[in-house]
Image (spheres, helix red, strand yellow):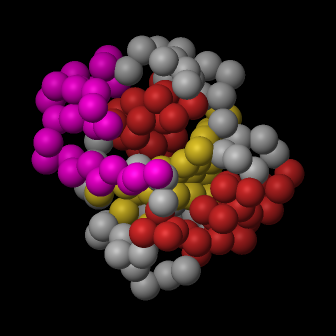
Amino acid sequence: MTHDIVRHDEASTMGQGIGAGEGIAAVERGSLEGKTILVVEREPLIALDLQRALEAAGAEVVVTGNAKDAVSRIRKSRFAAGVIDWHPSCEDHRLVARALKQGNVRFLFYATHAPEDVTTVRGAPIFLKPGRPEDIVQALVMLTGAC
C-alpha cells in the first residue's frame, strides 16, 4: 500500500479536484449520512471546523483530543472512518492508528509536518495543515466508499 501526502496549497485531494472557493458545496450534502467519524484533534478550533464540515455532509462526529479516550471509544463503538492529528513529538497518533487498524477502520492523518515514519502511515492518506475541512470530508467520502 502507498500513502498520499496532500498539500493544501494545491486544489486537489487524492485525485479529486475541488476548486478554490467551492467549500462545502463541493461535497454533496448527506454524502456521509449514517456514517460515524472519529476525529482525534488536540486543537479545539481545528476540531470544530472538521466537526462542522463532517456534520454538514451528514456524518455523526465523535471528537476527542486525547489518544487514550480515542482508543477507549474505538473499542466501544463502530466508526466508519477516522481523522488523526499527527505530531512528530508525540506517540499518541500511533496508539489511535493501531486501534483503528485492528478494527479495520480506514483513517487519514491531519499533520503539521509530513510523517517520517511510514510504517505508522502505511496505506493512510496524509493531509497537511493548514487545510480545508471540505478536503478532509471529500477524502473520508472516498475512504468510506460513500461516493
Residue 133: image quadrant is top left
Magenta segment, principal secondary structure? loop
Residue 37: image quadrant is top right
Expressed as whole percent of the image width and height from the top left, the position of residue 128 reads 29, 57
- For the point 53% across and 15% down, the residue is 30
Expressed as whole percent of the image width and height from the top left, the position of residue 3 reads 39, 53
Which is nearer the eye, 12 or 112? Answer: 12
Q: Is residue 10 magenta?
A: yes
Q: How many marks?
A: 0
- For the point 62% across and 58% down, the residue is 64
Which is nearer the eye, 107 or 131? Answer: 107
Whether residue 40 is situated above or below residue 147 in the rendered picture? below
Query: Looking at this rendering, what residue extends furthest in the front direction?
Result: 1
Whether residue 9 is situated above or below residue 134 in the rendered picture? below
- For the point 57% across and 58% down, the residue is 40
Expressed as whole percent of the image width and height from the top left, the position of residue 42 reads 50, 66
Query: Looking at this rendering, what residue extends furthest in the right direction?
Result: 76
- For the point 40% across and 30% down, the residue is 138
Which is nearer the eye, 14 or 113? Answer: 14
**Residue 53 seen by the camera:** no
Q: Look at the image and give the residue range highlighted in magenta.
A: 1-26
Q: Is residue 20 magenta?
A: yes
Left or right relative to 56: residue 23: left
Left or right relative to 90: residue 59: right
Which is nearer the eye, 82 or 53? Answer: 82
**Residue 72 seen by the camera:** yes
Expressed as whole percent of the image width and height from the top left, the position of residue 139 reads 42, 35
Whether residue 15 is situated above or below residue 91 in the rendered picture? above
